[in-house]
Image (spheres, rainbow, N blue to C red):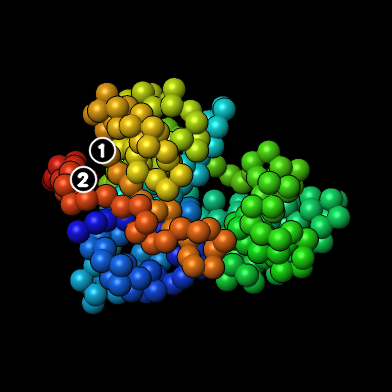
Amino acid sequence: MPADLHIHTCFSDGTESPEEIVALAKAGGLTTIAITDHDVAAGIDRAAAKGREAGIEVVPGIELTTEDANAEVHLVAYFIDHKNKSLLDVIQRIQKSREERIYAICKKLRNLGVTIEAERVFGIAGHRAAGRPHVAKAMIEKGYVKNFKEAFDRYIDFKGPAYVAHYKLSPKEAIALILQAGGLPIFAHPAVSNCDQIIGELTEAGLAGIEVYYPSHSSSQVKHYLKISQKYGLLITGGSDYHGKDSGREIKLGQTSIPDDLMDKIRNEYIRRNKS
């Protein structure tokens, strides 16, 4: 049965609880999911508990936002020790930076004639480590934009006038952190980052796989990343990057998944690396 290895909950910028995610996975015929919230691992225990009840394997994961000289690179991790002290210390630093970032984005937006309050953004998120999708929701709510795409395109995308960076690791730093926490580092949606030239050096640093199957990857891009995975001996992974029914993204849980044989290879590689 299929596995969806890229899913977000309300603990980052998803709209559904960990328990709701597991229920949706069960209803959709998935047998394995990975909870990969942005820069936070707080929803994993709740998902795992519900997964045990529902007969769904929940892989503990995270998605770390990193940056090299030319691009933003996202790394997802599978089978992390989500209570690892070094990991939690970095998460705490990132979460504080995310909170400060919202104030800075709201200030930039005010200078552009878009007045939204940071506290409203935090209220929409339900936590202090809000993200740009929560800013977009606040803008939609007040009628400044019609939808998420307009919010990002006009204001808060990577090159938008109200974009503000938050504290990020370098890709190699993130790989080292994931490995230290016992996880498998995976290059998420590589076509989005568009920096294939770094895959070789990331492999040397310990990269374990590539998210080949992703909703926005074209068939030619899938073939391209399959070849790169084979070239470097990397695991082939995939997932929907699901953020919820009300997230503004027309993506369904399990829309992109991987079959049992690829999931077995991922699981076996984790076991091989962590034999004591």
Q: Position of residue 260 (x, y in %)?
A: 18, 52
- Badge 2 amino acid: Leu
Q: Which residue is mark 2?
A: 262
Quadrant location, the C terminus: top left
Picture residue at 35% right of the left edge, 43% below the top: 213
Q: Which mark is residue 235?
A: 1
Q: Position of residue 6 (x, y in %)?
A: 38, 53
Q: Residues within 10 Å of mark 1 (few under 14, many from 20)?
A: many
Picture residue at 26% right of the left edge, 63% below the top: 30
- Confirm whether residue 40 shows in the render: no
Residue placed farthest to the front in the image? 219
Q: Are marks 1 and 2 in contact (CB under 8 Å)?
A: yes
- Mark 2: secondary structure: helix
Picture residue at 57% right of the left edge, 61% below the top: 248
Picture residue at 39% right of the left edge, 27% below the top: 199
Of label 1 and label 2, which has the lower sequence position? 1
Residue placed farthest to the bottom in the image? 53
Q: Give the label, 1 or 2, closer to the camera.
A: 2
- Confirm whether residue 254 shows in the render: yes
Picture quarter containing residue 124?
bottom right
Residue 84 located left or right of residue 258: right
Q: Measure the C-alpha gap from mark 1 to mark 2.
A: 8 Å
